[in-house]
Image: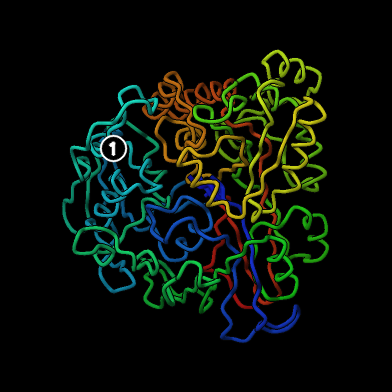
Amino acid sequence: MRVTKGAQIIAGSALLALAVAACGGSDAPAAGGSAPATQPVRVEIAEPQHELVPGNTAETSGAEVLNALFIGLVNYDAEKKPINQIAESITSDDQTNWTIKLKDGYKFHDGTPVDAQSFVDSWNYTANGANAYEGNYFMGSIQGYAEMNPVDPDGEGEQVAPPATATTLSGLKVVDNLTFTVGLTNPFSGFPTMLGYTAFYPMPKAAFGPDGKVTEAYGKSPIGNGPFKMAKPWERGKDQAISVVRNDDYKEGKAKIDAVDFKIYLDLNAAYRDLQAGNLDIMDQLPAEAIGSAKAEFGDRYIEQPSSGIGYIGFPIKTGADYAKNADVRKAVSMAIDRKTITETVFSGTRVPADDFISPVVSGYRQGACGEACTYDPVKAKELFDKAGGPSLGAIEIGYNADGGHKEWIEAVANNLRTNLGAEVTPKPVEKFATILDDLGAKKWKGGFRMAWIMDYPSPENYLKPIFAANASSNYSGFNNKEFEEHLKAGDSAKTLEEGIAAYQAADDILLKELPYIPVYFYQTNGAYSQHVKNVKIDPFERIDLFNVEKA
């Protein structure tokens, strides 16, 4: 998941952890001045949820750093189609058994080769349920995953799961230094499309200690294989920036800038003030209240373009409060939200009312798929809310991360619900998005919550399976539906693109009926950059192309 900023969830979903902000430096020149040649390019991020390990990074702030440090088997072109990067070829005769051949000459930052074993070791570690990695679920289609990650028999979390019977994936085999094979549990034609995601990055031998575990030191200073490398270890709670420098030995050439500081902010508005003052160089998402004036202020340094992100109100439908468990209440809440006014007023027209769980940027989106449930109708919403017993189910709480610029739209949703449903609604700001994710993962969160998702890879499946499949790592709602799972399997094993999309849309229809999340808006990228840099590009995954950024 790219929850986060991801979608990357946001990312990811990636849940989409949106950008956050803290104190800005005072050593940079004022806007309009010339930055010293030694000044790193300064990029705004939130505090990553975990240490910087590919398999345990499912939110967009940590992923932004890792995207500078690592590259994967594939990347994506302008049409969002996978193109080989480290992979020389990814082939299969039956869509179940895959052979991956690597290009020679890629190296990690410590000089060791990027080989087949480095991918196999990394994927096995991420897949091991004992490590509780956020990216674990993405290994779920590989043979042997079930033996490493047994679940309770009824899939409802009410029975104790049996012990694991394996510590490696039986479907992974090293053939030679530059070749490995992957056996899947079912045919999956979309498998190569996944392989540019963070969870599939390789790690070197140096990542693992004598006990076979990824070391604490590696999480603070990961050794990657990409265009930048760590300048120093990142100490959580101490360092206000994660610093990287150019990797001059990168096989694909040298980046155009010497260094990047990923500045960690706890207040998006503070980050924006730093951007205006020239103390920050790149923001990939501006605070909502700044969007209306940013285009005039930044001119051609303002970026507005389609994004793959979707913003939601979510509910823990298995373990939450009574109103969170009631599908009719959730539908009434959805119908009471004035998406059009929120997107036009709060976001100055830079968001689009959401009407599907699949983003318009990928094949499979259907305009108006959500139908009545996403159509603003206060009268019907109130009737349904009352009929479902909503008034007797207690105050509705909607949590949101205060570090991400969400107060305005969450307050607008709360006002809609108070006015249209007669409900008591309490917005609940939380300092860090990571706190909400941790509490949801521990099943401590009982009320509604703001959530978002940016695609990890360009497929309708990525908006469904990682977020709503049973036992998926980003399934914070607890949604579990056997018919939904069957449609996902049919989509995975479809022989044609059209058949696959139809199956995923059938799964989508179930979500649109049950509404474990309420789609509120489709994101647009609204970013900006200072006069100190140029050639700033942000892709639909909300990744900044730091390799090609230049000093102005």
Locate residue 375, reporting x and y percent. 74, 25
Residue type marked 1: Asn
Where residue 403 sits, quadrant-wise, is bottom right
Screen quadrant of the C terminus? bottom right
Q: Is residue 90 rendered to the left or right of residue 30?
A: left
Looking at the picture, does residue 552 appear above or below residue 192? below
**Residue 7 visible, this angle:** no
| Nearer to us in this view, 401 or 159 | 159
**Residue 152 visible, this angle:** yes
At x 44%, y 22%, the residue is 487
Query: Is label 1 in a helix, a strand or a loop?
Result: loop
Q: Is residue 300 rendered to the left or right of residue 110?
A: right
Looking at the picture, does residue 199 appear above or below residue 177? above
Which residue is labeled 1 in the image?
A: 149
Where residue 229 sits, quadrant-wise, is bottom left
| Nearer to us in this view, 259 or 163 | 163
At x 45%, y 21%, the residue is 481
Where residue 111 sits, quadrant-wise, is bottom left
Locate residue 483, reporting x and y percent. 44, 18
- Label 1 crowding class (10 Å Cα cut-off): few <14, some 14-19, many 20+? many
| Nearer to us in this view, 500 or 121 | 121
Q: How many marks?
A: 1
Q: Is residue 498 rendered to the left or right of residue 16?
A: left
